[in-house]
Image (cartoon, rainbow, N blue to C red):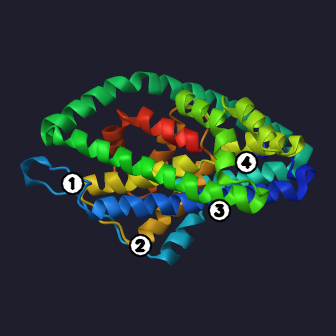
């Protein structure tokens, strides 16, 4: 649905492709920043390895090099990707399918409507599951604190601080450079005039709800109306830098909790998966948690480990939505 939301790329011309390319570059940069800070915190011993009962040990992550990662992106059998729950391949299939629908134009309208309808239905199902999740979160957090001690709460505060450090650094470096290099705007002017949208995003945790205010801020900064009307809604769907940082930090944290030491090849996998997953992240509260599950699946990290940080996801969400 994220790719379909771009509309007919032939109509928007080079602006559309330049926008998508910029989004991909900034998202990949966000992934790198997230990984750098996560590894710094991890190497400093601030991320814990959770103890298991009866002397059991965690399974180690499977080693992977860059070529293995690159080859594994492309599926040889589409249906096998779904049955094996290979989320990296599923994301690539979704991107190709969405691109095919756009390329088909009017002939692809039926498929576009079908995907949009299924997306709306799945959103409702996920909303129902999320509504029930506090029960599972409570029991999971109770188990974690009971088995690991109250020190785990301090570790959660550390990983939260790591994510926010990444948010701030990315905003200062990447957005300041972009404002100056592409628009000739002072970083101070940019953040001053963009602050209303950033504050609203921080409090609402919804990129979609922030679109109208973002449009007003873009007008204040001198953006052309037709360009901002296209770029801002598109960015709310496929440009999720904050979500990418969150996914990278959370993945390193949860891998450490499992006793896993990730290789360079696996770090590359995180960058690729988090970038692709961020493209499809919906601009609604809590959507980043769903995409994190995809990244964990690709890294062979138990998805149920996500419950360790789910209890403070709202705090993560405020910062990542502001950055998005």
Q: CA distance from mark 4 to mark 2?
A: 29 Å
Nearer the observer, 212 or 277:
212
Q: Residue at position x 85%, y 39% from top?
A: 109
Q: Is residue 286 above or below residue 78?
A: above
In the rendered structure, which disc, 4 or 2, sits on the residue that comes first in sequence?
4
* In this rendering, position of residue 118 left or right of residue 254: right
Q: Locate residue 272, reporting x and y percent.
A: 55, 62
Q: Residue 72: image x %, image y %?
A: 53, 67
Q: In 3D space, how far apart are the residues under numbered discs 2 and 3 (Cα atoms)?
A: 20 Å
Classify residue 221 as left or right of residue 50: right
Q: Which residue is mark 1?
A: 49
Q: Which mark is residue 3?
A: 4
Q: Residue at x 50, y 34 (%)?
A: 286
Residue 29 versus residue 232 in the image, above or below? below
Mark 1, residues whose alpha carbon is within 10 Å: few (<14), some, or many (≥20)? some
* 2 in relation to 38, above or below: above
Query: Crowding at label 4, few (<14), some or many (≥20) Cα neighbours within 10 Å?
Result: many
Q: Residue at x 63, y 54 (%)?
A: 175
Calculate the distance from the C-alpha at mark 1 to the C-alpha at mark 4. Answer: 38 Å
Residue to which mark 2 is pinned: 264
Q: How far across and how far down the image is residue 211, in percent?
A: 71, 33
- Circles 4 and 2 in contact, beta carbons < 8 Å: no
Q: Which residue in the protein does label 3 denote?
A: 25
Of mark 2 and mark 1, the one earlier in the sequence is 1
For the residues bearing labels 2 and 1, Cβ distance under 8 angstroms: no
Q: Nearer the viewer, mark 1 or mark 4?
A: 1
Closer to viewer: mark 2 or mark 3? 3
Separation (CA) of disc 4 from disc 3:
17 Å
Cα separation between marks 2 and 1: 20 Å
């Amino acid at each position: 649905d994220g790719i379909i939301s771009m509309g007919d790329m032939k109509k928007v011309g080079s602006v559309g492709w330049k926008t998508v390319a910029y989004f991909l570059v900034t998202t990949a940069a966000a992934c790198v920043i997230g990984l750098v800070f996560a590894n710094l915190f991890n190497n400093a011993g601030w991320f814990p390895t959770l103890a298991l009962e009866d002397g059991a040990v965690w399974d180690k992550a499977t080693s992977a090099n860059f070529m293995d990662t690159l080859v594994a992106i492309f599926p040889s059998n589409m249906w096998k990707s779904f049955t094996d729950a290979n989320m990296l391949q599923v994301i690539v299939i979704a991107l190709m399918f969405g691109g095919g629908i756009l390329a088909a134009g009017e002939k692809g309208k039926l498929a576009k409507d079908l995907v949009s309808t299924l997306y709306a239905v799945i959103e409702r199902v996920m909303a129902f599951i999320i509504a029930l999740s506090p029960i599972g979160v409570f029991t999971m957090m109770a188990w974690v604190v009971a088995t690991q001690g109250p020190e785990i709460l301090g570790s959660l505060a550390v990983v939260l601080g790591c994510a926010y450090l990444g948010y701030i650094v990315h905003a200062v470096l990447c957005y300041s450079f972009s404002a100056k290099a592409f628009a000739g705007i002072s970083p101070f002017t940019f953040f001053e005039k963009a602050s209303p949208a950033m504050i609203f995003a921080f409090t609402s945790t919804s990129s979609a709800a922030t679109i109208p205010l973002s449009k007003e801020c873009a007008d204040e900064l001198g953006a052309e109306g037709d360009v901002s009307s296209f770029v801002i809604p598109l960015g709310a769907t496929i440009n999720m830098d904050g979500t990418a940082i969150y996914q990278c930090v959370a993945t390193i944290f949860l891998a450490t909790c499992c006793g896993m030491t990730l290789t360079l090849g696996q770090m590359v996998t995180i960058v690729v998966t988090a970038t692709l997953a961020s493209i499809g992240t919906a601009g609604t509260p809590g959507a980043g948690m769903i995409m994190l599950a995809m990244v964990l699946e690709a890294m062979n990290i138990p998805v149920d480990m996500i419950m360790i940080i789910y209890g403070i996801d709202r705090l993560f969400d405020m910062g990542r939505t502001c950055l998005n």
